[in-house]
Amino acid sequence: MDQKYIDYAGQPQKVIQPWKAALYIRLSKEDLEKKNESVSVTNQREILVEYLRQHPEIELFDIYVDDGFTGTDFDRPAWTRLKADIESGYINCVVVKDLNRFGRNYTVGGDLIDNYFARKNVRFIALNNGVDTADDNMNAATRCISIGVTNVINESYSAMTSVSIRGTLNNHRKQGKFIGAFACYGYMKSPDDYHKLVVDEEAAEVVRMIYHKFIDGMSLIGITKQLNALGIPNPTLYKQQKGYNFNARGGKNDGLWCDRTVRRILQNEMYIGNMVQGRNKTVSYKVHECKAVPKDDWIVVENTHEPIIDKETFDKAQSLFNRHIRSSPVTKQTDLFSGLVRCADCGAVMSKKTNKLPYGTYRYYKCSTKRKQGKCTNHTIRIDKLENAVLTYLQTMVKLAVEYDRVMEQVNSNRINQKTNSMKKALDAQLKERDKYQKAMLDLYPDWKANIITQDEYLMLKANLTEKITKLDEMIENLKHSHNNVTPKNNDFVEHFKQYKNIDKLTRPMLVELIDSILIHEGNRITIKVKFIDALEELLRNMEKAA
């Protein structure tokens, strides 16, 4: 700002301040989407440069452009650089097209103009608003009110815009439209519709491998190490290699996988074709920090895109997360019974132990609660005996499922034949009835023309027959539909157990699919709880009825 001193004649004189100007330009994402030429970077630059041409006393130092940044906060790269140049003494004048381009935060914007710029002796000019803090002709109070009112209006516009945008985005989420900047690993945005996801087959193969390795018994750490050993780039590096301007939230990325990423993939419902959005939200239109949203408040729309993982595989993976699972430190492979064996009395997951003796090595499960807390009795079971018991039990269940399936297949076949014959008879009867009414309809017109019936009688009989034919058509269509959909109801227990016909060895995927828990009692007694218990009870009830 111009400084004053008193000359020898006692008259105040001005010292002309050399103005070093920063031209500041800002364009928000909303402006980019609207393609508003009046606030484009090019338009703003032309206006500001032309102003300097008309005011040669102001010398250009640099032009600072924040392209695609909101005005509701000042966490912008170009503005940060501009402020650093003010601190270094390179700049003492800031010129903007209008206050709206400077920012839409009433509190911060006002403080910068009224306090920060004043303390730093920085001249501030907003062309379209007629603001120039070096203009002695403008009353300070008037200028303060003018800037304050304009900033309040700009901020209120941001608030209303934020509410409108959030409402639109939530509507899109509820409709199952994808609104993220980047698709999750394994998918990409459809080139025909950016609100739809399509499978990225290269990444999808990695997702499938992660699920299959996990269900087969490999731990999260084991999967992570194998991915890195194979040289497979992690999701961040993969997207960057594909040309996306994508950066991980953590900042530095070395391209390596970590177990958190593997866990996230294994728990992401997007991979079964469900659109899951709204997991995070910004604090407000002024505070752009993200915070997590409770899972119950996520917006989930089912069957919006092609699944990479089937629902059954996904459910198996989720069931494993609910168990206390330990992997071998050498092989990184999950033990056969890990997370499944529990103490029948205290309910704790039992620990695997190994005893090496001169005459042999014994592996067994033991309740750790007694040793750690002294609150339980000594429950143990040798692993070889446990394996034999579980295998025998599952073989029995499999035989039950196979036999039931064979019997019910025959029963259902007979029922279907009976139902089909019954439907066919009903359908033939309805078709015969329709032919009768159709023939009567054809005979009406000649009877009317031959004066056998009057015109009123003709119209009344025609309407009556037409109504009956319409009802018969509906009944015939329903019978045809029922005939085409006569299928027996599947039993979940049977469907899952019968596929393991002739099993002679236990595998980890088999146990994960079929067994809920194995309870060890005192005296080596075992209780095996299988999954699909409701379906099993239904099966047993049906067998009792059949007997």
Image (tube, grey):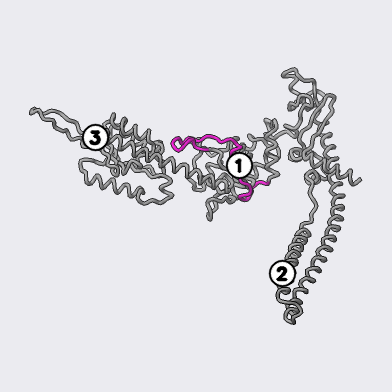
Q: Residue at x 23, y 33 (%)?
A: 1
Q: Position of residue 515 (x, y in %)?
A: 77, 37
- Of mark 3 and mark 1, the one earlier in the sequence is 3
Identify the disc placed on residue 230: 1
Q: Earlier in the sequence, mark 2 or mark 1?
A: 1
Locate the C terminus by quadrant: top right
- Place residue 398 in its image quadrant: top right
Within 10 angstroms of label 2, few (less than 14), some, or many (20 or more) residues? few
Q: Secondary structure at mark 1?
A: loop
The amino acid at mark 1 is Leu
Question: Which of labels 3 and 2 is toward the front?
Answer: 2
Instruction: Report x, y in % for residue 20.
Output: 25, 38
Between 527 and 168, the residue placed more toward the observer is 168
Q: Residue at x 70, y 40 (%)?
A: 316
What is the CA distance from the residue labelled 2 to the residue labelled 1?
A: 77 Å
Tag 3 secondary structure = loop
The answer to whether residue 431 is left or right of residue 305 is right
Q: Is residue 300 magenta?
A: yes
Q: Which residue is mark 3?
A: 139
Asked where in the image residue 23 lies, by quadrant, the reply is: top left
Q: Residue furthest left?
A: 9
Of the image marks 3 and 2, the number of the one nearer the N terminus = 3
Magenta segment: 281-310
Residue 317 circle label: none
Q: Main secondary structure of the magenta part?
A: loop
**Residue 463: which disc?**
2
Considering every residue shown, the one lying at the far top of the view is: 374
Q: Amino acid at mark 3?
A: Asn
Q: Quadrant of residue 390?
A: top right
